[in-house]
Amino acid sequence: MTPQEASLKAAEICALAPVVPVLVVHDLAHARPLAEALVAGGLPALEVTLRTPVALDVIREMAKVEGGVVGAGTLLTPADVTAAITAGATFGVSPGATDRLLDACEAADLPLLAGTSTASDVMRLLERGYTVAKFFPAEANGGAPALKAIGAPLPQMKFCPTGGISLKNAHEYLSLSNTMCVGGSWVAPTDLVNKGDWKAIEELAREAAALPR
């Protein structure tokens, strides 16, 4: 997969909904009902972060949910890429970008939302052929004003900003011409997941899916 092909696929995934849930799942039993609630609420693209011992099994379970498009977040190494694909991930997300990681994703035909935080990061990805990336950590890096400023000299790159984004400030990002969608964890809060309140999570997803962009 070329960087250009990867970017086209990433753009398709970002176009599915205004919000990509960023999920840190500790209990495998939560995987399927959580995915079902989010997809039912209108958020089909799901990022499962590789931050827990059960993350790969969670991807396997979520990949069985009809209508879901499951990706693996926190990809750091080529080994992560292989494990994520084996588990059923159809896209990847990383906090940054290294040549080894990009090489591995391209060789494995896995579209990647590679993390960027500076204009230099963006320029390096553009130079390689990417036109879709992650902006992370969004709020810590100056928020929507910073992303808007980066877009002025580098309008070729489109973003999925993640990090510190909530229902309260998501619209600030989604209103930008260089933002395709946002990533956020607020649609699956820990307390609701632990209680198994899937209906409440579905309603949060529905609210997020209705955000204008």
Image (spheres, grey):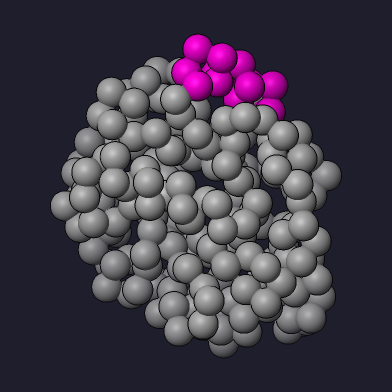
Is residue 178 part of the magenta span, yes or no?
A: no
Which stretch appears magenta? 143-155
Residue furthest toward the left? 107
Residue 176's place in the image compared with 33, above or below, is above
Q: Position of residue 36 (x, y in %)?
A: 62, 81
Task: Name the residue nearer the viewer: 35 or 98.
Answer: 35
Q: Position of residue 37 (x, y in %)?
A: 68, 78
Residue at image point 74% right, 81% down: 198
Residue furthest toward the top? 153
Residue furthest toward the bottom? 29
Residue at image point 61% right, 16% down: 149
Is residue 154 part of the magenta span, yes or no?
A: yes
Residue 169's place in the image compared with 200, above or below, is above
Where on the picture, by quarter, is residue 131? top left
Residue at image point 43% right, 38% down: 132
Q: Position of residue 85 (x, y in %)?
A: 29, 67
Where on the picture, by quarter, is residue 188? bottom right
State how many labels appear: 0
Residue 137 seen in the current view: no
